[in-house]
């Protein structure tokens, strides 16, 4: 996962991009689900879209979600499908991971870890922010 | 410039702290709905004070929500400006982007 972190500019230079800021854990509310639906719609329309997982949003990427016991759809698996729909830039905030004791190896391997300066750069340089 | 809106009480929810952690120089923060209790959060803001003054972040509170809850600016250690709904809309228009913390 960390192999491609070195190219900071390509990950966070977001002029003209829509940025989805995903701050909530999956399942407790419908917010995480709605962010995926938004990403899929944007991907289908060819819009350049980036997802940033920060604060409790990082739990969306946590591995081994076993949702059959609550009769829900597997959120991590749905996220993993996003690249198939043209949504390839999924970024996760390093500070939020460390605060929660989550190792990058515990995440689905589609997301790239970025530090807090990269987060600020991303927010400053995208065109539109949608908060989920 | 990003306008950050915060609508949850800092005593019940992490989003004000998360907002303060992420806001950058020149940004603006406005407390709305239960977020206005953040303007009474002395010790909580104290921890972020050096960072806030360093970053030159403007702080606003939505007056109708603030007064409805019986709050007074004298209770806060930081400089908040009270704004009405009209000014809130202007702040949104002046900002490049709005980021909602909820």
Image (cartoon, coloured by chain):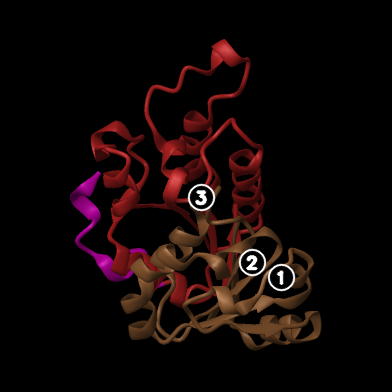
In magenta stretch: residue A4: yes
Q: Nearer the viewer, residue B25 or A130?
A: B25
Image position of A97 (left or right of A78): left
Disc on res. B66 = 1
Labels 3, 1: one chain: no
A26 and A39: which one is in front? A26
Q: Disc 2 designates what residue?
A: B36
**Quarter residue A80 falls in:** top left
**SS category of the residue bearing label 2:** helix
On the same chain, marks 1 and 2? The answer is yes
**Magenta part of the protein: which range?**
A1-13
Q: Nearer the viewer, mark 3 or mark 1?
A: 1
Q: Is residue B40 above or below residue A29?
A: below
Q: CA distance from mark 1 to mark 2?
A: 6 Å
Q: Which of the pair A128/B100 is nearer the observer?
A: B100
Which mark's residue is nearer the viewer, 2 or 3? 2
Q: Which chain is indicated by disc 3?
A: A
> In the picture, which chain is red?
A
Q: Residue at x 39, y 32 (%)?
A: A62
The letter of the brown chain is B
| A69 versus B45 height, above or below | above
Q: Chain of mark 2?
A: B
């Amino acid at each position: 996962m960390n192999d491609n972190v070195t190219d900071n500019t390509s990950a966070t230079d977001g002029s003209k991009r829509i940025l989805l800021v995903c701050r909530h854990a999956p399942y407790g509310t419908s917010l995480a689900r709605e962010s995926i639906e938004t990403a899929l719609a944007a991907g289908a329309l060819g819009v350049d879209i980036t997802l940033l997982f920060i604060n409790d949003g990082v739990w969306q990427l946590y591995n081994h979600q076993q949702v059959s016991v609550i009769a829900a759809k597997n959120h991590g698996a749905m996220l993993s499908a996003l690249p198939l729909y043209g949504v390839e830039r999924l970024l996760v905030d390093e500070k939020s991971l460390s605060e929660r004791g989550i190792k990058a190896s515990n995440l689905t391997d589609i997301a790239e870890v970025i530090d807090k300066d990269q987060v600020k750069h991303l927010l400053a340089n995208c065109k539109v922010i949608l908060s989920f | 410039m990003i306008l950050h809106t915060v609508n949850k009480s800092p005593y019940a929810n992490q989003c004000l702290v998360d907002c303060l952690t992420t806001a950058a120089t020149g940004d603006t923060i406005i407390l709305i709905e239960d977020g206005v209790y953040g303007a009474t959060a002395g010790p909580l803001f104290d921890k972020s004070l050096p960072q806030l003054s360093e970053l030159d972040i403007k702080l606003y509170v939505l007056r109708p929500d603030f007064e409805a809850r019986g709050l007074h600016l004298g209770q806060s250690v930081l400089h908040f400006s009270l704004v009405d709904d009209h000014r809130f809309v202007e702040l949104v228009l002046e900002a490049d982007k709005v980021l909602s913390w909820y």
